[in-house]
Amino acid sequence: MATTTDESRFRSRTSETFTRIREDVISGKFAPGTKLKIEEIARALDVGATPVREALSSLSSDGLVVRQDQRGFRVAEISASEFGELLDIRCLVEERALRLAIERGDSDWVEGIVLARHRLKSSSRTGEFDLEWERCHKSFHTALIAACGSSILLRLCNQFFDENNRYRSIARTSSSDSRDVGCEHEAITDAVLARDADLAVTLLLQHYRRTGKMLQDALIIKAQSSLSDAGTS
């Protein structure tokens, strides 16, 4: 009979496995369309097959992984048109979440934003997908909307953030030299802390759409390059 300690360890292994696989999918280590073989992943992570299967099932609910009947799991495919739709919906959801957070946020919410901003500013981005910076970046954006009071909005925003990051990693693009993302974060933070909802929303959506435009351009170029390579092979 399983003990409470055994159950706790199993949940912990499943959670850690979910995090590792999710980060590998988001970072592009597992490319779109890649078949995710449970036994291989289990060996690589030194865990049993069950935590891997549980993690992949959860990721399929988030849209990062696709479950195929009788054929296991694959990493979800990508496309420029799908990304455009994702960006539009993300902006709608985050606008609602941010307006509610500004309306409802208390002193703990304010403190959380200030702390998250400090950690992000203190984190140096060293590569195309710097894991520590990515975690601080996500914590910052999560802190902005943390007080919205809706678990559904928070879940959707978390899902869209991860999907956006996967596209950014696969497109292999970061902010251009002419763009100061740090200043954009500062301006958003100042507007949120001043509880200027209209300005905060405008700045946040501009921030997302600037990145979105670069990603869509990069995805189109990659798609054209793939077609060209296929035509000459």
Image (tube, helix red, strand yellow):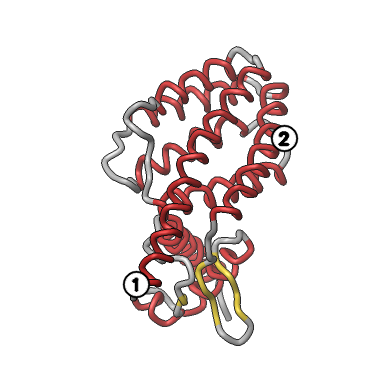
Residue pointed to by mark 2: 149
- The quarter of the picture where residue 144 lies is top right
Which of the two residues, 45 or 23, is positioned nearer the viewer here? 23
Which of the two residues, 180 or 125, is positioned nearer the viewer here? 180
Residue lying at the far top of the rendered structure: 194
Is residue 105 left or right of 27 when viewed as pictured?
right
SS category of the residue bearing label 1? helix
Residue lying at the far left of the rendered structure: 126
Distance Cα–Cα, label 2 vs label 1: 54 Å
Q: Are marks 2 and 1 in contact (CB under 8 Å)?
A: no
Q: Residue at position x 68%, y 44% from top?
A: 89
- Check disc 2: other Cα within 10 Å, few if <14, some if 14-19, many if 20+: some
Which label is found at residue 12?
none
Instruction: Indicate which label's residue lies in the foreground, 2 or 1.
Output: 1
Residue 65, image x, y percentages: 55, 67
Residue pointed to by mark 1: 232
Residue 223, image x, y percentages: 45, 59
Is residue 199 left or right of 214 when viewed as pictured?
right
- Check disc 1: other Cα within 10 Å, few if <14, some if 14-19, many if 20+: few
Which of the two residues, 212 or 116, is positioned nearer the viewer here? 212
Amino acid on which disc 1 is placed: Thr
Amino acid on which disc 2 is placed: Gly
Residue 208, image x, y percentages: 54, 35
Q: How many marks?
A: 2
Which badge, 2 or 1, is on the more N-terminal residue? 2
Say which quadrant the N terminus sits in: bottom right
User: In the picture shown, does residue 6 fall above or below 89?
Assistant: below
User: In the picture shown, does residue 19 fall above or below 38?
Assistant: above
User: In the picture shown, does residue 190 fall above or below 149?
Assistant: above
Say which quadrant the C terminus sits in: bottom left
Residue 180, image x, y percentages: 38, 25
